[in-house]
Every structure is written in structure tokens, then in C-alpha cells.
């Protein structure tokens, strides 16, 4: 297939590009910094300039593509949530998705599917019950972002395009994401759960994140919001215990919630002190088989 990936030079994008190339697909990447992107991507990948805000010359690669994957978005945990940073988190997702849908609208030969990234933050804090895709959204900032983000993506259905919005948990890899920052305290023998430790910690191994994305591209029956989280749900305390075991380190030094709020501000709540027991119901029902269904298997593989 001919596949266009927006944000293809990021952490998830590079992993997805590599797997798609192995499968024999032709890849075009949309990047705001083409020269930098070309340095980090294989030579057979075509890189197109875009501003991630408006339709431009890049839209020609959408016309005739079989699939589009949008991974664009300002890092959620990269900087303290100032008013300006929150605006950037929101606009980077909404504007890029709107531009892609607009390019699809004008295409003579529209893609069959748009896979547009979302996040489990859609649900907000759900401390007790299992969360499947029909669970309502939360009421915090990240929930609001995800609701608007998905809404923009689903407008592509008006043009006959199948839309999948993966609600992704924490992706486990030493190559990027949250895990590398979680490893340091354990390396120093001061690792432990964040906050009470009772909050749910939805996670997914990088291989399954990419595998599920490819499954979403190829499986014509999969559509709408899809939970991308492993079936082996754990709490923060259980995750950190498993992480300590995999690293042969203790997990005894919890970080109080009030300390995290002082250090990180508003983001500490929705990112670290709350969670959801996410169930990947649609993936399971559609026949996707997780390579790493339990956190012990996942961490043993990631940290080997």
C-alpha cells in the first residue's frame, strides 16, 4: 500500500515506518523539518514539508494514498502546563488533523482509512470500573483535548473514509516515551510508585502499539475509537514492582502526590496521579493477538 504518515520521524513514527517498510509498503512522511527527518529515516522514505496547520503542496501525497496515519502533536509531558503550552498541546493536534481531513476532502482518489492518534486520557480518572471504548469522556484538560481531536478526525467519514482513533496508553520502550524517565530512580535504588500507587496504569509494549496500528490499517472492520492498551491491567504500584523486579532493584520509595504537584504543576494529576483500567475490547474482538499481554513479559523484553 501507499501510506502517508504525519509525524513519521517521532518516537512512534520511526518504529511504524520501519515495520511498514519491512511489510513492503511505500511510505511518505509529512514533517515540519524535512532535512532533520530525512536524517532519521531510511532512504526509501519520501519526506514532504508541511506546517501541520494548513493544506499546501504536501496534499498531493494524500491523493491516491491507501492509508493516512496522523501521529502529530506537541508532547504532553515535555514541559510544564502553562497557558501557552496547553494551547500548543491542543492546537498541534486539532490543526494537523483538520488539515489532513481537508486534504482528504479535496483528493480525487481518497484513502481508504485514516488512523488518527488519540489517548486513554480521553476517559479521565476512572478509579474502579473497567473502561471499554463506549465509556464516556472525563472532564479534565486531556479529556477535552482528546474529545476535540477525535471529533476532527471522524469528519473524514463524511467522505467515505474509515476512521480509527487509537486511544493509546503508556508505550513501553527504552527508545522514547515515559519509560526512560521512570528508569533513573530505580537505577539509583530509590524507585517506587508515584502517588498512592492505587491508580491504574494503562500500558502497551511498543511492538504491540505498532502491531495494532498495522492491524487497524489492514482490518476493514475496525473503526472508531479503539483502546490501544495491553489486556494485563496493573496499578501504578504493581507496575513499579514489576519494573523493580525486571531491573533487580527494590520498589520501596513512593513519591507523594503533593510533591509531584509542586514539581510538575497541573499535569501531575491527569498524567501521573490518575488512571484507567483500560480494556482493549475492540482489538480483542477483531482478532488482534498481543505479543506482550502481561507487564512482566513486556518489561523483561524491553529491558533485556
Image (tube, rainbow, N blue to C red):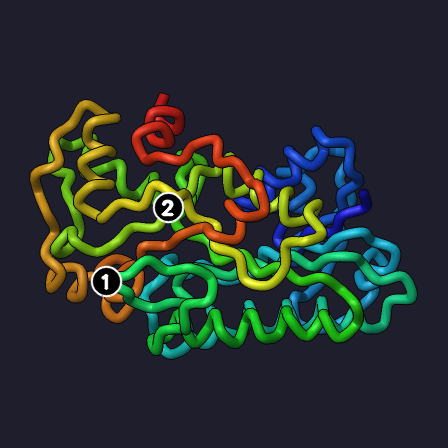
Q: Secondary structure at mark 1?
A: strand
Q: Residues within 10 Å of mark 1 (few under 14, many from 20)?
A: some
Q: Is residue 119 left or right of residue 79?
A: right
Q: Is residue 184 left or right of residue 104?
A: left
Which residue is nearer to you in this view: 212 or 50? 212
Q: Which residue is mark 2?
A: 203
Which residue ends up furthest to the front in the rendered image?
Answer: 285
Q: Looking at the image, which residue is at 35% across and 28% down? A: 297
Verify CB contact (< 8 Å) between mark 2 and mark 1: no
Percent of width and height locating residue 191: 15, 38
Which residue ends up furthest to the top in the rendered image?
Answer: 304
Q: Secondary structure at mark 2?
A: strand
Q: Looking at the image, which residue is at 35% across and 34% down? A: 294
Percent of width and height locating residue 76: 41, 61
Sequence order check, earlier mark of 2 and 1: 1
Q: Which quadrant would residue 300 be assigned to in this image?
A: top left
Count of numbered marks? 2
Q: Which residue is mark 1?
A: 127
Amino acid at each position: 500500500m501507499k501510506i502517508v504518515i504525519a509525524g513519521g520521524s517521532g518516537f512512534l513514527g520511526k518504529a511504524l515506518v520501519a515495520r511498514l517498510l519491512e511489510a513492503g509498503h511505500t511510505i511518505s512522511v509529512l514533517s515540519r523539518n524535512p532535512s532533520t527527518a530525512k536524517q532519521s529515516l531510511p532512504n526509501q522514505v519520501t519526506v514532504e514539508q508541511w506546517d501541520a496547520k494548513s493544506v499546501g503542496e504536501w496534499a498531493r501525497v494524500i491523493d491516491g494514498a491507501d492509508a493516512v496515519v496522523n501521529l502529530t502533536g506537541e508532547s504532553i509531558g515535555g514541559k510544564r502546563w502553562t497557558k501557552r503550552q496547553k494551547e500548543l498541546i491542543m492546537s498541534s493536534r486539532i490543526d494537523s488533523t483538520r488539515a489532513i481531513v481537508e486534504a482528504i476532502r479535496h483528493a480525487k482518489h481518497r484513502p481508504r482509512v485514516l488512523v488518527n492518534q488519540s489517548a486513554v486520557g480521553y476517559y479521565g480518572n476512572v478509579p474502579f470500573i473497567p473502561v471499554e471504548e463506549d465509556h464516556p469522556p472525563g472532564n479534565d484538560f486531556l479529556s477535552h483535548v482528546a474529545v476535540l481531536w477525535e471529533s476532527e478526525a471522524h469528519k473524514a467519514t463524511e467522505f467515505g473514509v474509515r476512521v480509527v482513533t487509537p486511544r493509546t496508553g503508556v508505550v513501553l520502550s527504552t527508545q522514547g516515551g515515559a519509560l526512560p524517565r521512570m528508569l533513573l530512580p530505580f537505577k539509583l535504588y530509590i524507585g517506587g510508585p508515584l502517588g498512592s500507587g492505587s491508580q491504574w496504569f494503562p500500558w502497551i509494549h511498543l511492538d504491540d502499539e505498532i502491531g495494532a496500528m498495522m492491524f487497524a490499517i489492514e482490518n476493514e472492520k475496525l473503526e472508531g475509537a479503539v483502546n490501544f492498551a495491553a489486556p494485563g491491567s496493573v496499578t501504578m504500584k504493581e507496575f513499579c514492582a514489576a519494573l523493580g523486579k525486571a531491573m533487580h532493584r527494590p520498589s520501596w520509595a513512593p513519591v507523594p502526590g503533593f510533591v509531584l504537584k509542586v514539581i510538575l504543576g497541573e499535569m501531575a494529576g491527569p498524567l501521573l496521579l490518575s488512571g484507567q483500567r483500560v480494556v482493549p475490547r475492540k482489538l480483542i474482538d477483531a482478532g488482534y493477538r498481543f505479543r506482550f499481554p502481561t507487564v512482566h513479559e513486556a518489561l523483561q523484553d524491553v529491558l533485556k
